[in-house]
Amino acid sequence: MFSNTEKENRKALVIEDEEGARSFFYPNLVVIERESFFPWNKRQEFGLISSEYSSSSDPSSNFHSAPKIASAKRVLRDLNQRYTSLFLGKGYSLDEILSEERSFLNSNLLYFIAVTDRNEDTLYHSQMVARYTLLLSKALGVDDKEFLTSIERGALLHDIGKIGIPEGILRKPGPLTEDEKEIIKSHPFLGYEMIKEFDFLKKAAQVVLYHHEHYDGSGYPYGLVGEEIPIEARIFTLADTFDALTSDRPYRKGKSFDEALVEIEKNCGSQFDPLLADIFLSLPLEKLEQLKEETYRYLSPRLVH
């Protein structure tokens, strides 16, 4: 058990299960059960968010992340049960299973993202980066269907841990404080902890946990360098960054595709694997534009409100 001083000096996450038991999670350390500390700041108890993070002056409306995480895990467990009953032990060939399960899971994962996040931009971004990720993977010569299926699921769910981050931080119009930045950086761990128990998402979890690592070691959560970063995450980060650069934000207009590609080229060897970045930069511009247009058309009538 850590002392109060040690708790304040370490970054931590707390996961709460359906019965209210809380797990105190330190990266690279051990899990301590049934703690009540969560470092939104060094003076607050778990789940008690200051009024600046609340959309209402009513204290009862303040954000509580643990119930949202527990609820999301219940949805995933139900999806896992339906997936198991539909596809496992039915005598299908591998190709038949991969084709059918891809359609089943992708549609359900998109719905899962929509009902847990309720932000149309998140749904669009998740689908967009999944398509860019598959395009780059295939351009690299990857034809393993299991790999492509797993990396696509990871791309769809890469930011799912953000349901454990206060909305007031995620939607804050101005610059984040240092404490708020550290809270944001917890989302890969939260997402990984949410999905790691499910067999159909085990490989996808590599993207969720490592998608903010940088090739030169300047990323998070572990500061991995080069090929220490799983290939799935190194592929994905290019797709993620490209879509982020070319998408409008409340505080800025999205860059043109040409401008975004110049930005990626500038960060070869620092943020991005230079070999993968070279392949991404060689992708036909018209193909990237076509994917973006198709994704927008596909999702526009299907958005969940």
Image (cartoon, helix red, strand yellow):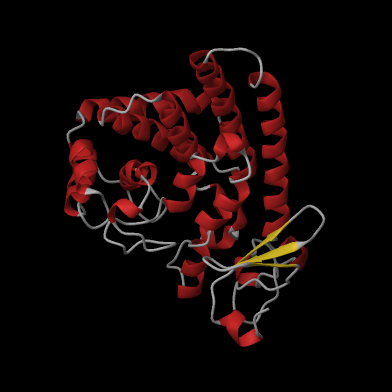
Q: Nearer the viewer, residue 141 or 185?
A: 141
Q: Quadrant of residue 243?
A: top left
**Nearer to me, 94 or 292:** 94
Quarter of the view holding residue 23: bottom right
| Residue furthest right as drawn | 19
The quarter of the image holding the C terminus is top right
Q: Is residue 280 left or right of residue 300?
A: left
In this view, the residue in front, 264 or 115, is: 264
| Quarter of the image where the N terminus is located | bottom right
Q: Is residue 171 visible?
A: no
Up-down relation of residue 165 to residue 303 (above or below): below
Residue at the image position 49 percent from the left and 39 percent from the top = 203
Residue ID at (29%, 33%): 136
> Measured from the top left, where is residue 246 in percent x and y?
31, 43
The percent position of residue 256, horizontal first and vertical second, equals: 24, 41
Q: Nearer the viewer, residue 55 or 103?
A: 103
| Position in image of residue 226 (x %, y %) | 28, 54
Q: How many marks?
A: 0
Q: Which x, y percent locates residue 276?
A: 24, 41
Residue 145 drawn above or below residue 212: above
Residue drawn at point x = 50 percent, y = 73 percent? 179
Asked whether residue 15 is in view, the answer is yes
- Residue lying at 26% horizontally and 31% vertically, measured from the top left: 140
**Residue 17, located in which quarter of the rendered image?**
bottom right
| Left or right, 16 with reference to 228 | right
Q: Residue furthest bottom?
A: 5
